[in-house]
Amino acid sequence: MPDAVSVPAVRATIGDSEFDRDTAVTLREPGVYDVDLSAGWTILSAVNGGYLLAVLGRALGDALPHPDPFTISAHYLTASQPGPAVVRTEVARTGRTLSTGQASLFQYDDEGREVERIRVLASYGDLDTLPEDVRTTAKPPAMPPMDQCFGPEDAPAPVPDSSAIVDRLMLRLDPATLGWALGAPSGKGEMRSWFGLADGRDPDPLSLLLAVDALPPTAFELGLSGWVPTVELTVHVRSRPAPGPLRVSITTRNLAGGFLEEDAEVWDSADRLVAQSRQLARARIS
């Protein structure tokens, strides 16, 4: 089995991992948090949208009386850069089982003006209180075992410094969705991968916000090149994930007018559908 699939000798734990440190928020005053966006979660020079969502999700988890994101919708207004930022939160409503709030992340431009990067609206609850009854027609994605899948380190010619985030992830991509890497995209808008954090930290609700936006874009298998910036992303967290690697399946059914949708499902090691998402993204048509 390749080294990239091996369990780290010393596994990081939830609350004490690189992901936790890099999504940490510091309360400055009620509703205002200071953050430092890490360059380790960038794609090219832009900060990954799932990582940003986890940062704002952590701030809202501190501001709201309930611990877990149930649904969170984000609009990406301008590209975030590594470095200092400020998150401002507002509590919209609190109830017995759900609380709702909004948050925005701001940075300063070269002229010292404050620029809003991302704005989210979210409802939080307690996943541990949900009933265990599950009625679903959804099925886990059919994927080869992890040791028969491929990671970024298997690429014939990686681009130096192009994607720092891959060093922080355990990605093992389904060969059936890797035609683009061989110059022969399938024409199907599909991407599937085993997913985890490289330091062995087990998944939790916040890392699910990262998982839905961490795979190569489905546009690659549609024959398009270049990265695909997110316009809007909505995530539904359905259950607290079991320890172990996740399986992420993403599909696109419609590319039109230079935009496409990506529908993601995240399954845990216990074969439970623990998160779903849909995002609207802009595709570069050449």
Image (spheres, rainbow, N blue to C red):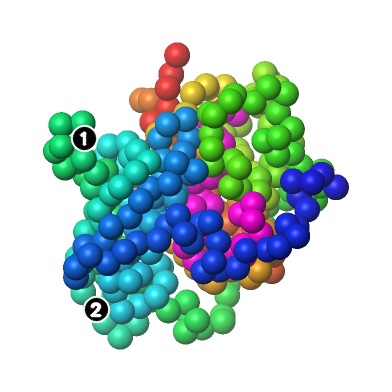
**In the picture provided, is 251 more to the left or to the right than 122?**
right
Q: Which residue occupies the foreground of this view, 147 or 260?
A: 147
Dot 1: within a 10 Å radius of its alpha carbon, few (fewer than 14), some, or many (20 or more) residues?
few
Say which label, 2 or 1, has the lower sequence index.
2
Toward the right, the furthest residue is 1
The magenta segment? 197-221
Q: Residue 94 carries which label?
A: 2
Q: Residue drawn at (38%, 25%), measured in percent from left and top? A: 258
Quick check: marks 2 and 1 in contact, CB under 8 Å?
Answer: no
Q: Residue 252 at what x, y percent from top left? A: 51, 38
Disc 2 crowd, CA 10 A, few/some/many (<14, 14-19, 20+): some
Q: Magenta segment: does it hold 50? A: no
Residue type marked 2: Thr
- Residue 91 image offset from top left, x and y in percent: 21, 70
30 or 236: nearer the viewer: 30
Query: In the drawing, what numbered circle is on residue 84?
Result: none
Q: Which residue is drawn at 21% across and 59% down?
A: 88
Relative to 67, 203 lies left or right? right
Q: Can residue 268 be seen in this view?
A: no
Q: In which quarter of the image is the C terminus?
A: top left
The residue under the point 45% across, 55% down is: 22
Q: Which amino acid does label 1 sit on?
A: Asp
Q: Looking at this view, is 48 or 38 the one in front?
A: 38
Residue under the image location 47 percent in, 84 percent down: 129
For label 1, the SS is loop
Residue bearing mark 1 = 109
Residue 222 versus residue 145 in the image, above or below: above
Badge nearest the viewer, 2 or 1: 1
